[in-house]
Amino acid sequence: MFPTVSHFLNYLFGIDVPLPFNTFGVFVALAFVAGYWAFSEELKRKEALGVLHPTKRKVTIGEPAHIVSLLTNAFFGFIVGYKLIYALLNYKLFVNDAQTVLLSTKGNILGGIALAALFAYWEYREKEKAKLPKPKTVEVTIRPHELMSNLIVWAAVWGFLGAKIFDNLEHWDSFIQDPIGGLLSFSGLTFYGGLICGGAAVLYIAKKNGIKPLHMLDVGGPGMMLAYSVGRIGCHLSGDGDWGIVNLNPKPFSWLPDWLWAYTYPNNVANEGVRMANCVGKFCNELPQPVYPTPIYEVIVAFILFLILWKIRRQINLPGMMFGIYLMMNGVERFFIELIRVNSKYVVAGIPFTQAELISTILFICGLLLVVFSIKNKEKHANY
């Protein structure tokens, strides 16, 4: 396993480059990049078809820098400088435990002051360049795909918060013991929490810019499936604990690699299992028994489902149907993977189930209802 990018580089090239990047985080970022691409392509396609339309907005140009904008930039500059300079001056600690360095109250005051001044000056200079003798109000046109930068930020912030909240609800006992650690930890993210909260934020911003909810949902279906596939690569490579149940069954095919059938996740980032012999460093544990490598299964299945969605998107014209199909595919995929995946279980009326099983069932039903709704309202949606 490769808990950090440095481990990965060492495995590939045999070189030791100390970098403060964990593998899971890198693939989360790549997942957003993949989603950004798919969303943008769909927004452009739907605009070309006349389904989505540019919006007009009035903005004032030529104004001098306001005190509020200067203070805001100075504040963010101080935070960046306070933590960044401290991290650079304590680089070894930063590489070994980036989470503690970033989330602690420790920092470099001089670095914070320097970056605060730089950020404020930068804002002042940019405003001075565009300053006019008399500020004026102009109307600008914003095309749908130009909203993506704003949408991706909202999706990232609210998606992360949702993923943390749902994860702590799923592991309530651990959260009660250490609520602050549970909220601030970079590990432990629940996909459905991110999907629900991040999706709600995206719909809010889209609606404010004239994109109707059903159209925005349809745009997001393929992109979210692709992003999920890419993100799961990080889960597998880092060994974040999102694996399956113990698998001691013989391989069904001799040509199937062991790591694709049953794997012990050595050097996993979750530090689960038993200590490995002759291992030095922070990540020296592996599982005592091999388990189903469910993240890699989801990588493969989710990518195949993305290809299907990407293929059929041109043939589906009813608003809401594309997203309904996505929800059904997502629900079925996650429900069945839960059958061989380690997870916390709830028991209601004697029936055990996981959080993901419950939500995936609800999503499948919602997807089915959305497809039926789209078909029944075909004529009504002709001009939607």
Image (spheres, rainbow, N blue to C red):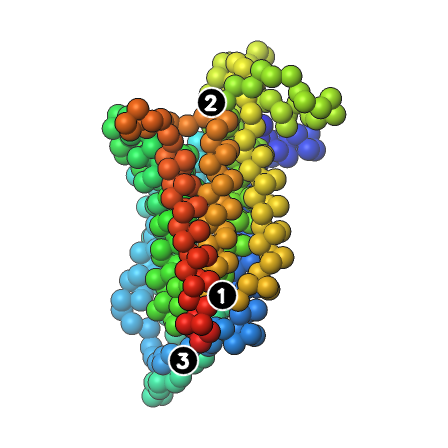
Closer to the chain start, of discs 2 and 1, is 2
Does residue 215 appear in the picture of this structure?
A: no
Q: Farthest residue to the right: give it.
A: 255
Question: Tag 2's secondary structure?
Answer: loop
Q: Measuring from the top left, give residue 315's x and y in whole percent.
A: 59, 64
Tell me how far mark 2 sits from mark 1, CA to CA: 48 Å
Residue on which the image places disc 1: 318
Position of residue 120 relative to residue 102, above or below, is below
Q: Residue at x 66, y 20 (%)?
A: 251
Which of the pair 153/22 is nearer the observer?
A: 153
Question: Label 1 neighbourhood size at 10 Å, few (<14), some (14-19), many (20+)?
Answer: many
Provide the residue designation for mark 2: 271
| Image location (x, y in percent) of residue 361 | 41, 41
156 versus 60 height, above or below:
above
Quarter of the image with the C terminus is bottom left
Q: Nearer the viewer, residue 217 or 371?
A: 371
Q: Residues within 10 Å of mark 3 (few under 14, many from 20)?
A: few
User: Callout 2, which amino acid?
Assistant: Asn
275 left or right of 384 in image = right
- Decide which of tag 2 and tag 3 comes sooner along the chain: 3
